[in-house]
Image (spheres, helix red, strand yellow):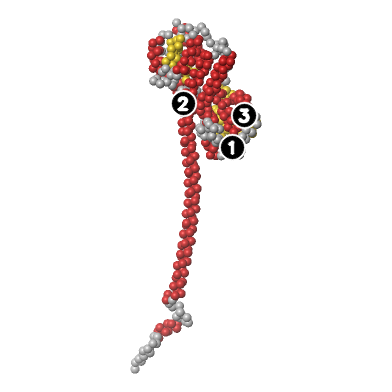
Amino acid sequence: MTARTRPPPPGAEPTSRRAALDSRGPGSAARAEPAAGPDAELVRLRAECARADRDREALRCQLAQVEAERVALRGELADVNQHVARLHDQLLHPQRVESAGTLAAGLAHDMNNVLAAIMGLAEVALDDRLDPRLRSDLEQIVSEAERGAALTRSLLAFSRKGQYRKQVLEIDDTLRDALPLLAHTLPKTIELRCELGAGSVRVDGDPVQLVQVLVNFALNAADAMHGAGVLSLASAVVELESEPARLLALAPGRYVRLRVTDTGSGMDEATRRRIFEPFFTTKPVGKGTGLGLALVWGVVKGHLGAVDVESELGNGTSFSVYLPVTEAPLPAARGNTGLRRDLPADTTILVVDDEPVVRAGITRILERIGYTVLGAADGAEALRAFAAHQVSIGLVVLDMGMPVMDGAECFRQLRRVSGVPVLIATGYALDEQLQTMIAHGAAVIEKPFSSASLLVEVTRLLERRAAARRRAR
């Protein structure tokens, strides 16, 4: 008989399920369904919060890194802006100097004409028969006009449009010549020291302008020392290698270095960068023009040199001027030049100048010696006068800056028809123009000139013309 299995009573678990549960041991039922209770949800939320905290910390680190990079970039940008500002100042400095130089050259040209007229007429009025007091007054007028001429030469030196009176010289001699002037210029409370170290080394320079450089340095130092301190001058021969020469915009080689050092208040970097700009000054209004060191810059550049400055607030200032050494010999001593009185008395001289007073002064000087003088106010009028009197005209005194036709064009047209001697009388002219005219036989005298200087040049040119005619016979 087949055994029949009875079904479990209602509500009873199946035998197989109960056996499976019994096999897992005590407490297994509590761990079977973890997702079903509130504790499991809390665990999940805690895990998500931990992940969020980790993400937030990572983001905070990234933000800190970005901020550090931003600060670094801001510093780099500030450095770039400062560099751009320095480059901008370096770019504008030559433009400012050039603009001021053009203005100075124009003013100096006009001033030279005024001074030429004053000197010419005052010297014509001088006569041995004059009352001594009147004669003394006239001599004082001439002396003051010569001082004015020195000022215009400084302005032209600054603009580099003047003709330097260069000569080969020993720089130590120039320093010795400057010492008495500096001693009288500076307050007695400033001690002046000098150390000469250049020896017999020579440079090609204008001694008057180089002394003016030293005077300008000294005056600047006196202000910085407030009237009391030590001013030291020193000369030396230095060899500039490629890198130091490059920083000074010079070619490598031998240079004479003039150093002027004071014990004054010094200057900050911003002031040091602008110290050679025209019209820049740290002095109160009315106490300075801002041209002293700008004139130094112009003179040194005109001598193919360089000027450098070292300074620190509270520790004084040191200026160094570098001038190229020359191997040329010193000039031979010149003897006294006497005026010849045996030249033809009937010689006619054509004076060409657009300033009536200047023209009148030159005319009076020449007529007093016995020459016949014709006048012209511009180049075109001069050419017409020369065409009408060519046979008798033995010399032309020619200004450069004139309306209608300037001196350079007048000279070119004169040379097409005649080899007549020409004396260029000018306050300033472009070097290229002058060199071209000199190459074609012209001589130059710089305004304002004394009557003696004019007569020396006139006599020399007429003697040369007379000698050429004698050789041609």
Which residue appears at 56% of the width and 23% of the height?
Answer: 207
Q: In the rendered image, which residue does mark 3 sit on? A: 186
Which residue appears at 61% of the width and 24% of the height?
Answer: 177
- Residue type at mark 3 is Leu
Closer-to-camera residue (376/315): 376
Question: Considering only order in the chain, which callout, 3 or 2, is on the residue closer to the N terminus?
Answer: 2
- Circle 1 or circle 2, nearest the eye: 2
Q: Residues within 10 Å of mark 3 (few under 14, many from 20)?
A: some
Q: Is 227 located above or below residue 130 in the figure?
A: below
Real-space Cα separation, disc 1 to disc 2, in angstroms = 34 Å
Percent x, y for residue 220?
58, 32
Q: Residues within 10 Å of mark 2 (few under 14, many from 20)?
A: some
Q: In the rendered image, which residue does mark 1 sit on? A: 266
- Residue type at mark 2 is Gly
Using the rendered view, name the quadrant where residue 322 is placed.
Answer: top right
Using the rendered view, name the quadrant where residue 318 is placed.
Answer: top right
Percent x, y for residue 295?
53, 29
